[in-house]
Amino acid sequence: MITEENVLNALRQVEDPDLKKDLVTLGMIKNLVIDGKKVSFAVELTTPACPMKDMIHNACVNAVKYIVDKEAEVEVTMTSNVTSSRQQMNFLPGVKNIIAVGSGKGGVGKSTVASNLALSLAGQGASVGLLDADIYGPSIPTMFGLHGQAPEMFEQDGKNIMVPLQKHGIKTMSIGFMLQPGQAVVWRGPMISSALRQLINDVDWGELDYLVIDLPPGTGDVQLTLCQNFPLTAAVLVTTPQKVALDDATKAAAMFRLPMLNIPLLGVVENMAWFEPEEHPGSRYNIFGTGGGQKLAEQFEIPLLASIPISICISEGGDAGVPAVLGSNEILKTAFKQLGKAVAQQLAILNSKKQM
């Protein structure tokens, strides 16, 4: 007879390749039902973007057939429940993970990476929000085609709460939604910090698996306000291969690792890694050099999450309100989807270590 005990014993032989423990110990086996030779259960992964989903599915089927009964009819449903290691759940209680996307200097495509990372995570089944924390140069309204739109408001406990604008399946918020076209933000540090707190605290983010925060370049007031006052889960570094960008990204990485901040680094994104002309597919030109992102990753002992090529499709899509991961360029779509999977994977590993 096929019993619950021998099925679970078989599934103890299947290990999550990232978390390095078996599925039963991790509590991933749900709703096990046995009816004669029919065996059905769900595997609850730590992220819908799990790159090993098919491998785990096949391993479960094979374990039951080879260890329990070769004639077993095994039905495995792959589900997900994004994990979280946040301790201060009184702040944004519905948000499981807060990811800051930062760089040491401007012009490296940080907002492009943040936008496409958020969309990649959402495209793989997660609930995602995107906060444009670049107070001086907000770009999310343009990149999402939301110029001229303003968030709705409602009153809660005597305070006005903003409702994020939704586009392409994610919730977005930016200081740009409150500005007139061409209006400059001429504020000193305390005003910037106050505005940032309002964009986070006074917004109805609801239930989110991931809140991606697009930081301004540098290591100033906004970064310190965010890192010191809000419980970030981790940060992602964006750089180009050239030395001047790497030098500044190194400073940003050092800031996140300051003892008073201690924000874990998930990895490095190397943007503008190469250029490939459409008329000469396969011909790559390293305009800004090579290997810079890998060197930065090795310096801080973190993964190189993705290398993104430079392409006119990125700027054209951003101007049109259609980020690259939603466009027609397959190379870019693949690169940004890989970024989303890598970030989800590293977050799941990080959360697992914090819970041990």
Image (cartoon, rainbow, N blue to C red):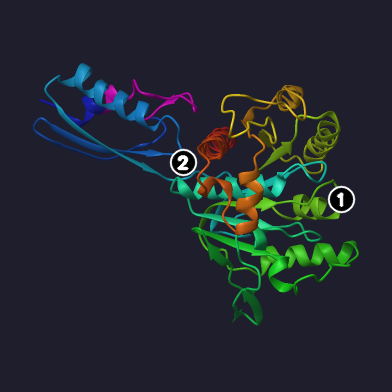
14 relative to 341, above or below: above
Q: Is residue 189 left or right of residue 197?
A: right
Quarter of the rendering containing residue 105: top right
Q: Is residue 16 left or right of residue 32?
A: right
Badge 2: residue crowd in 10 Å (few <14, some 14–19, many ≥20): many
Badge 1: residue crowd in 10 Å (few <14, some 14–19, many ≥20): few
Q: Which label number is shown at residue 47? A: 2
Query: Residue 119 or 59: which is nearer the viewer?
Result: 119
228 relative to 238, above or below: below
**Residue ID at (19%, 21%):** 65
**Which residue in the rendered view is the most extreme toward the right?**
188
Range of the magenta residues? 8-23
**Residue ID at (73%, 66%):** 175
Image location (x, y in percent) of residue 137: 78, 59
**Residue ID at (42%, 29%):** 52
Q: Is residue 191 left or right of residue 47?
A: right
Residue 233 in view: no
Query: Residue 211 or 144: which is nearer the viewer?
Result: 144
Q: Which residue was labeled with disc 1?
A: 220
Q: Are the two marked residues, 2 and 1, in contact with CB atoms closer than 8 angstroms?
A: no
**Which residue in the rendered view is the most extreme toward the front?**
279
Image location (x, y in percent) of residue 141: 66, 63
109 relative to 94, above or below: above
In three-dimensional space, the C-alpha distance between marks 2 and 1, rounded to whole angstroms, equals 33 Å
Image location (x, y in percent) of residue 235: 69, 41
Q: Is residue 327 magenta?
A: no
Query: Residue 239 or 56: which is nearer the viewer?
Result: 239
Q: Secondary structure at mark 1?
A: loop
